Image (cartoon, grey):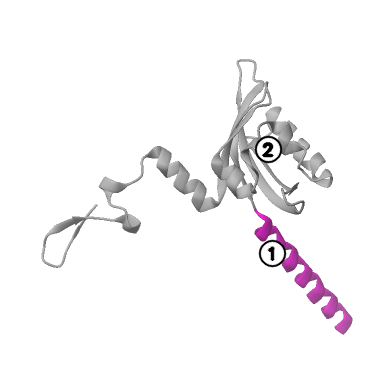
Amino acid sequence: MTVRRSQGRRAKSTRGGVSARKRPQSGDRLELVMHAINEGVYDWDIDTGKVDYSERVTAIMRFPPEQLQTAQDWYKRIHPDDLARYDAALVDHFKGRTDRFECDYRFRAVDGSWRWGRTHGVAQRDARGRAVRMIGSTGDITELKLAEIELRRARDEAHEALERQT
């Protein structure tokens, strides 16, 4: 897109301050997007259990990289009350009942606290349709969940107050 300067000279559009010549390449673009949505990428070899977590995953989730090497390393951090929902969503996706995996759950942080995570993923399948690899993203949504909990609490209090008045 070309725009005119006040003196009639042409200038390149800068769409958010980045000229066409200086736009990020695809790898840089992905990194910028993941930063924008506060998530990181993982690539899970389902047969071996090995997971390649991006640096953003370990940074966002506050884990030293050596503590996240396999799917089991992550799985054992999921809150026991959320495991059934997580497993069900994973099985549904692996069996082809859903187009993508998505689950919100609590996880044990390095400092011992419980935080909220959201994981998305899409399985790649072999010739028989069996899920052999899953690639996706994960991020910490603790602040969002805490705001939802507070909103729900305020709504419940308002309903109770209205009921007491009637």
Tally the marks.
2
- Mark 2 residue crowding within 10 angstroms, few (<14) / some (14–19) / many (20+): few
Residue 2 at x, y percent in the picture? 21, 54
Compared to residue 71, the image places residue 146 above or below, namely below
Task: Classify residue 52 as left or right of residue 156.
Answer: left
Residue carrying label 1: 147
Residue 4 at x, y percent in the picture? 17, 61
- Identify residue type, mark 1: Ala
Which label was assigned to residue 33? Answer: none
Residue carrying label 2: 67
In the rendered structure, which disc, 1 or 2, sits on the residue that comes first in sequence?
2
Queried whether the magenta region covers residue 147, the answer comes back as: yes
Queried whether the magenta region covers residue 39, the answer comes back as: no
* Residue at 66% from the left image edge and 60% from the top image edge: 143
Contact between labelled residues 2 and 1, with CB atoms less than 8 Å apart: no
Task: Classify residue 27 as left or right of residue 140.
Answer: left
Task: Name the image quarter holding residue 17.
Answer: bottom left
Which contiguous range is marked in magenta? Answer: 141-166
- Mark 1 residue crowding within 10 angstroms, few (<14) / some (14–19) / many (20+): few
The Cα–Cα distance between marks 1 and 2, rounded to whole angstroms, is 29 Å
Figure quadrant of the C terminus: bottom right
- Identify residue type, mark 2: Gln
- Residue at disc 1, secondary structure: helix
Using the rendered image of the protein, determine whether residue 163 is visible from the camera's viewpoint.
yes
